[in-house]
């Protein structure tokens, strides 16, 4: 009889533990879903701004991206750093995961790499990395400076959680494929404000 009571209590303990852990996962996902909370709970330091650091390559590309995204939302202020950082850029990079005109972005939570930006809109992050390859290192086409800047602005947009425009008729730096300008369109600005607030 005593054994049964112990078994029952142990089962109850397991069920309660399971329920608590599941509700924790659910609330964490909900808390980060489409709101500013993931930025606050991620690596973003509100007092300082979002620290962006050029780890490799031409600082001017990182600066262009920073200047384009700054001033759109009062909640988003990118600041250049040379030590601690939230967004790392690797432009003109020999070991870029991307080729051709295209760039590549990754988000991390701790050491865990998160899923693709377009399919994952709920994860929290504390670091993002943006890449663009060095033109002479890979592929055949050499992008123009403007095309390269546009790619850099696009990748930093992903680091700020801006997704691709779904309607190809709409002009956007956040469109898939090559554009020839790097200045932000209405879609890009509205998307940033939608994620962070105006
Ligand atoms: Zn993209």
Image (cartoon, rainbow, N blue to C red):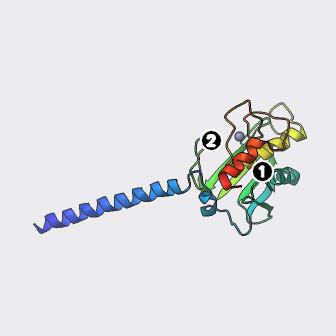
Q: Name which quarter of the figure residue 66 lies in.
A: bottom right
Which mark, residue 118? 2
Closer to the camera, 127 or 184?
184
Q: Residue furthest left?
A: 1
Asked if residue 9 lies left or right of residue 49, the reply is left
Asked if residue 38 lies left or right of residue 185, the reply is left
- Disc 2 residue: CB within 8 Å of ligand 1: yes
Q: Residue at x 25, y 62 (%)?
A: 12
Residue 135 % position (x, y): 85, 39
Q: Residue furthest front?
A: 198
Dots 1 and 2: beta carbons under 8 Å?
A: no
Quadrant location of the N terminus in the rendered image: bottom left
Residue 99 % position (x, y): 76, 37
Quadrant location of the C terminus in the rendered image: bottom right
The Cα–Cα distance between marks 1 and 2, rounded to whole angstroms, is: 21 Å
Q: Which residue is mark 1?
A: 90
The answer to whether any part of residue 94 appears in the image is: no
Specify the quarter for ligand 1.
top right
Residue 120 % position (x, y): 58, 45
Residue 174 % position (x, y): 74, 40
1 or 2: mark nearer the eye:
2
The answer to whether any part of residue 28 appears in the image is: yes
Closer to the camera, 174 or 113?
174
> How packed is label 2: few (under 14 Cα within 10 Å), some, or many (20 or more)?
few
Q: Label 1's element? A: strand
Q: Label 2's element? A: loop
> How packed is label 1: few (under 14 Cα within 10 Å), some, or many (20 or more)?
many
Q: Name which quarter of the figure residue 35 lies in.
A: bottom right
Closer to the camera, 181 or 82?
181
Q: Name which quarter of the figure residue 44 lies in.
A: bottom right
């Amino acid at each position: 009889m005593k054994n049964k009571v112990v078994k029952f209590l142990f089962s109850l303990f397991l069920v309660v533990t399971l329920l608590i852990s599941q509700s924790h996962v659910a609330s964490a996902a909900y808390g980060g879903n489409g709101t500013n909370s993931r930025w606050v709970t991620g690596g973003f330091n509100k007092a300082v701004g979002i620290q962006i650091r050029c780890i490799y390559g031409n600082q001017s590309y990182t600066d262009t991206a920073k200047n384009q995204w700054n001033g759109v939302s009062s909640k988003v202020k990118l600041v250049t750093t040379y030590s601690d950082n939230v967004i790392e850029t690797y432009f003109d990079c020999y070991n870029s995961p991307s080729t051709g005109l295209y760039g590549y972005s990754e988000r991390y939570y701790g050491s865990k790499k998160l899923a693709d930006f377009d399919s994952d809109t709920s994860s929290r992050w504390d670091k993002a990395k943006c890449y663009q390859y060095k033109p002479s290192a890979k592929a055949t086409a050499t992008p123009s400076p403007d095309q390269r800047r546009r790619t850099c602005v696009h990748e930093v947009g992903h680091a700020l959680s801006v997704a691709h425009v779904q309607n190809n008729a709409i002009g956007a730096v956040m469109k898939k494929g090559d554009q020839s300008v790097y200045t932000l369109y209405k879609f890009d600005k509205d998307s940033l404000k939608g994620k962070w607030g105006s």
